[in-house]
Amino acid sequence: MFEELEKLEQRYNELERLLAEPKVASGQSQYSNLAKELSQLSGKVTLFRELKKVVKEIEDLEGVLKEAYEKEFLELARKELDNLKKRKVELGERLKNATSEAEADLDKDIIVEIRAGTGGQEASIFAADLYRMYTKYAARKGWPTEIISSHATELGGYKEIIFGVKGKDAYKMLKFESGVHRVQRVPETEASGRIHTSTATVAVLVEPEEVDLVIDPKDIKIDVFRSSGPGGQSVNTADSAVRITYLPTEMIVTCQDERSQLKNKNKALRVLRARLLKQKIQEEFKRVSQERKSQIGSGDRSEKIRTYNFPDRRVTDHRIGITIHRLEGVLEGDLDEIVESLLKASKEKRNEPCPS
């Protein structure tokens, strides 16, 4: 860990030198990018420098304790040494969190994708319920939301809805929502009163800024077409809908909610960047990490994470085994108990010793 932090400090010093050069200062784009990188490193480097100072003070005090001094002085030195060792542990923990990939993204805005899974129209209605739940939770936290793309159904559900969430701690509080959500209830369309099980998938993506992930224009193909609403009817008379294909992987993003072709294109690019960043992070994780996955889940969309059971009015998160008998409150956006339990489980998991 120290070696990596030494490299970060060296890069920080290099950035300070570069930003002081007149040639760099005159180039607005380069200066902005370097200043942003410096700002991102500042917190970690400050902690690292404080940790190095504490380590040096511990070494000095341990040397003092080997010398022959008065008893009272040595007692004071031992107390100070104990305090410094506690401070060292605290700084080490803060650095560990600050340098992890997940912690680095905690203050970034996010894009949430919800898609209807198995269950036909009922799955689409459930997707709409989840969208409403998350937007109500965001409103409680004071986070603005915006619909980026949606495909509504005739019964008021969504085949797919993608929306942005902006605000401090949005990613921290919602990052564990990725996965399969399951609902068990009697659908309004079911005449016999049988309980059905339907699903919807959720993906929570960090929204990168343009400097975080640059897309080569040669790697994308942009098509425009006429927007359509539920049932296939045309919702405008202009070709404003946009489909972007990322050619290296054939990833496709479509946006048609805006009447402006440019706005749809910009929104589609935001979603594409977020998906590509998540793919890049996942590939890097698989390449370099052989550690076990957290028991609270990997964020894989194929993983069933939660059940919303209407007959019993309960919500169960299967990753941490928590059941809450306040289904209506949860669907109204009262997610705090679930979110805090997931954060606590994640913290405890990070603090476990690695298996030998």
Image: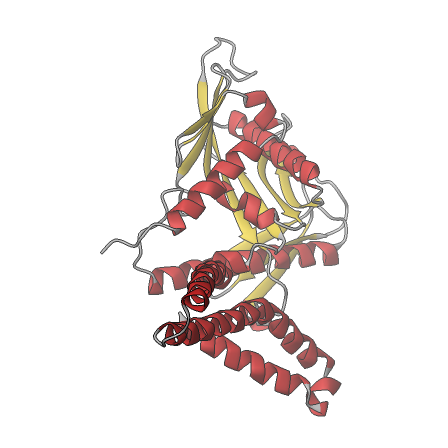
- Front residue of 192/85: it is 85
Number of marks:
0
* Residue 282 position within the rendered picture, expressed as x and y whole percent measured from the top left: 42, 58
Q: Residue at image x 66%, y 75%?
A: 35
**Coloration mode:** secondary structure
Could you tell me which quadrant the N terminus lies in?
bottom left
Q: Residue at image x 43%, y 60%?
A: 82
Query: Can residue 356 be seen from the camera position used here?
Result: yes
Q: Is residue 318 left or right of residue 263?
A: left
Residue 337: image quadrant is top right
- Front residue of 255/272: it is 272
Figure check: 108 above or below 12? above
Figure check: 191 above or below 250? above
Q: Residue at image x 48%, y 61%?
A: 87
* Residue 135 position within the rendered picture, expressed as x and y whole percent measured from the top left: 66, 37
Figure check: 79 above or below 293? below
Could you tell me which quadrant the C terminus lies in?
bottom left
Figure check: 97 above or below 211? above
Q: Is residue 79 left or right of residue 330?
A: left
Q: Is residue 202 left or right of residue 157?
A: left
